[in-house]
Amino acid sequence: GLPENALAGGVDSDGSTLYVARALNNKIWQAAKTQATWTTANVGFKNQELVLENFEYLLDDGNFSWQPYKGTLPKNAVWTDKEAGVKLGICRCKHVESTQIGRINKGNCSIGYGGSEFNYPTFDVLTYSKK
């Protein structure tokens, strides 16, 4: 089940809280979203939304914050893995009356929603600063 200190990062279109996760896709950990009632995590990938069973929750210790993306990943950006040497950051963006969690991909926030992948150039980046 959902850990007590899972990091909430968004709100789905049905009003449910979305939690930050990372899910294993093709041997790479990608930023993902999950809900308290789900046993999977979802990612946007190659024009579709993938539902993945192998995932981990991000646990909140009070040091995470969301910052507007300004063209480059901040030094304290949270990332899930590296792909071809590129750090894969975690993002969130507005989509259809919701705030979705996704991965940063070529300057966009890539999310999975309704079976498809969507990319948004305006988004927030998850950062970590020890208080």
Image (spheres, rainbow, N blue to C red):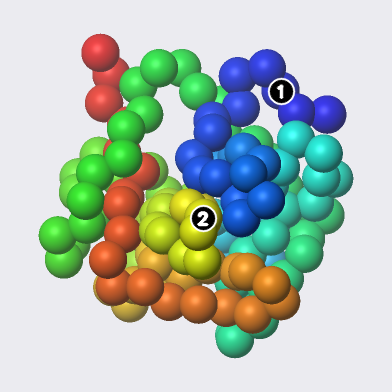
Q: How many numbered circles does the render carry?
A: 2
Residue 25, given in percent of the width and then of the height, sits at 68, 66
Label 2's element?
Answer: strand
Residue sitting at x 51%, y 66%: 96
Give the residue pinned by disc 2.
Answer: 98
Mark 1 to mark 2 CA distance (whole Å): 23 Å
Disc on the earlier residue, 1 or 2: 1
Residue sitting at x 71%, y 23%: 3
Mark linked to residue 3: 1
Within 10 Å of disc 1 (Cα), the crowding (few <14, some 14-19, many 20+) is few
Residue at the farthest bottom position: 47
The answer to whether residue 88 of the structure is visible from this angle is no
Callout 2 amino acid: Ser
Residue 73 sits in which quadrant?
A: bottom left
Examine the rendered structure and indicate whether residue 30 appears above or below residue 18: below
Q: Which residue occupies the foreground of this view, 57 or 87?
A: 57
Residue 123 sits in which quadrant?
A: bottom left
User: Nearer the observer, disc 1 or disc 2?
Assistant: 2
Mark linked to residue 13: none
Within 10 Å of disc 2 (Cα), the crowding (few <14, some 14-19, many 20+) is some
Left or right relative to 33: residue 122 = left
Label 1's element?
Answer: loop
Examine the rendered structure and indicate whether residue 123 appears above or below residue 125: below
Residue 48, given in percent of the width and then of the height, sits at 66, 81
The answer to whether residue 14 of the structure is visible from this angle is yes
Quadrant of the image for the C terminus?
top left
Callout 1 amino acid: Pro
Callout 1 touching callout 2 (CB < 8 Å): no
Examine the rendered structure and indicate whether residue 4 appears above or below residue 120: above
Residue sitting at x 26%, y 26%: 129
Residue sitting at x 21%, y 51%: 68
